[in-house]
Amino acid sequence: MNPEIISILSIAVTVGFVNGTLPGPILAAMCTQILQRGLRSSIRIPFLCAGLVALIAITLFTVFSALEVPTRTLNIISLIGGIFLLFLAWKVGKIKNVTTKTTEVFTMKTIALLVLLNGSLWLSWFVIFLPKALQLGRIIPHGQYAFLLVYLTFWLLGIFTVSLIFTQFRGILTRPKVLPIVFKCFALVLVFFAGVMIKDATLALL
């Protein structure tokens, strides 16, 4: 397989899985629902979110494909995305606890608003994933949708992995001495792929 395709899809796999495991409103909703009504009742949350993320991604794909954005512009956006990924890695490395206490009931409407009004999600797709997805689309037919499918698959896998672990080993993994180590490992993974994005974009721009 083309090494460039492998590199792009490895970003979709790894960053998708890591994003699925990170604390945030979606994972908080999932864990809260698990505490309140069990794992089976909470399964609808990530699938609804995945559908909405796909809507955001397809919107961006459509707009940028219609504009016929030059490859150089995508490389510049990718360079910015790599820097943004470093910032996310720094934030992940600082995580010391996971808060799941809330009195809010996570209805379908609430979850939809949670995703659609999440500015950081739109920004992540714009500067990190969009250029890579469109780049894959220029290598293989409909590659951008393959990128989206791979990303969402591993994002869901990350969420369900954390949810299962949360139900079984919550007491161990949320210990003050253990949790920071776990997220520092995730931060290092993000740093690695940020380096890959920055290197590839820089070489393409030279």
Image (cartoon, rainbow, N blue to C red):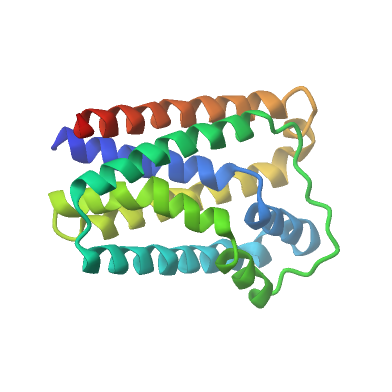
The N terminus sits in image quarter: top left
Give whichever of 116, 2 is nearer the camera.
116
Give whichever of 87, 105 is nearer the camera.
87
**In the figure, is residue 194 to the left or right of 202?**
right
Q: Residue at the location (33% across, 37% down)?
A: 10
Q: Residue 193, percent across and down? A: 40, 31
Q: Residue 56, percent across and down? A: 43, 66
Q: Residue at the location (36% across, 64% down)?
A: 60
Give whichever of 146, 194 is nearer the camera.
194
Q: Residue furthest bottom?
A: 109
Give whichever of 117, 180 is nearer the camera.
117
**In the figure, is residue 54 to the left or right of 30?**
left
Location of residue 180 with respect to 62 vertically, above or below: above
* Number of marks present in the image shown: 0
Q: Residue at the location (76% across, 36% down)?
A: 97
Q: Residue 115, percent across and down? A: 58, 64
The C terminus sits in image quarter: top left
Q: Which quarter of the figure has residue 128?
A: top left
Q: Residue at the location (70% across, 53% down)?
A: 28
Q: Residue 2, percent across and down? A: 13, 37
Q: Which quarter of the figure has residue 48?
A: bottom right
**In the figure, is residue 206 to the left or right of 92?**
left
Location of residue 54 with respect to 70 vertically, above or below: below
Location of residue 8 with respect to 121 vertically, above or below: above
Q: Which quarter of the figure has residue 182?
A: top right
